[in-house]
Structure formats: structure tokens, C-alpha cells
Image: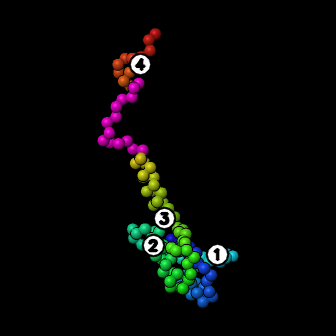
Amino acid sequence: MQIAIEVGPVGADALARLEAAGHLVRHEGERWRVIVTATVLGQHSVRAQAHVLAHDVIHDFALEALTQPPSIAIRDPDGVLDIADTEVMLDGVRRAYDPDPLKRYDPHWWQKQMELGLGERKA
């Protein structure tokens, strides 16, 4: 996963250390973003892992977070997490439309009329 962390202005020394650590720094006007690539660990929440990583990067490189908690954006360049999320969502949708196996369904009114012979047309 890639995490973009919105930070205050990055000094030259911090910029050099971030780039040496393999992180990217994007500067557009007044906005500074540090982009960190990380591996998702285990079954823990991706967002929780991203926030922990953001706090670590801000602390380790003496950066200034503009918001508390730090504003982050998560991107999955390989699409692995997107596929897993989609599968979970589609399974939930499928289950929502499955009939309840324990519910007994009564015939509809027109089926009852057909059984009684009231729904037949007479010539």
C-alpha cells in the first residue's frame, strides 16, 4: 500500500533523509505530501496500520502534521486490497438477496384463487 501523509513545509535536511529512506516528497504550492510505501501486515485494519505508520514517519523525520490525527490517503497500487474488499461486498449483497431458509412462505392471493378454482376463465 502507499500512504500519502499531508505535512507542513519539509526542510532540506528532512527532505534528504526522507529520500534516502526511500520515501517520496511531493510539493505543490503550499501543500507538502510524504508518500510512503509499506506492506500490509496480517489481518489488522489497513487504516489503523496507515495511521501508525504516519505517526512513525512524522516522529522519525521531525515533520509537522497539519491535522490531528494526521491527514492521510491510502492507495493500493496493485489492487490486491480492492479485489478483497469487492469480494466481501459482493458476498454481502448476494446474501441479502438469498431467501431466508427458515421462513415458510405462504402462497400469494392469486395462487390461492387458482387452487380454489376461482381464477379460471369461463367461456
**Disc number lying in front (4 or 1):** 1
The amino acid beneath tag 3 is Val
Could you say which disc has been placed on residue 49 in the image? Answer: 2
User: Which of the two labelled residues, at mark 2 and mark 4, occupies the earlier sequence position?
Assistant: 2
Mark 3: secondary structure: helix
Q: Earlier in the sequence, mark 2 or mark 1?
A: 1
Viewer-nearest of discs 3 and 4 = 4
**Callout in the foreground (2, 3):** 2
Identify the residue position indicated by label 4 in the image: 119
Residue 119 x, y percent position in the rendering:
41, 18
**Marking on residue 80:** 3
Magenta-drawn segment: 97-110
- Type of residue at label 2? Gln
Q: Is residue 94 left or right of residue 15?
A: left
- Residue corresponding to mark 1: 31
- How crowded pointer 4 is (Cα within 10 Å; few <14, some 14-19, many 20+) is rated as few
For the residues labelled 1 and 3, the Cα–Cα distance comes to 29 Å
- Give the residue at x 34% y 31%: 106
Q: CA distance from mark 3 to mark 4?
A: 56 Å
Within-10-Å neighbours for mark 3: few <14, some 14–19, many 20+: few
Q: Secondary structure at mark 2?
A: helix
Q: What whole-number distance in Å separates the C-alpha atoms at marks 2 and 4? A: 64 Å
Q: Does residue 121 show up? A: yes
Give the CA distance from mark 4 to mark 1. Answer: 73 Å
Type of secondary structure dominating the magenta stretch: loop
Q: Is residue 106 magenta?
A: yes
> Is the residue under label 4 in contact with that under label 2 (CB below 8 Å)?
no
- Point 48% across, 64% down: residue: 81
- For residue 88, above or below residue 103: below
Residue 26 falls in image quadrant: bottom right
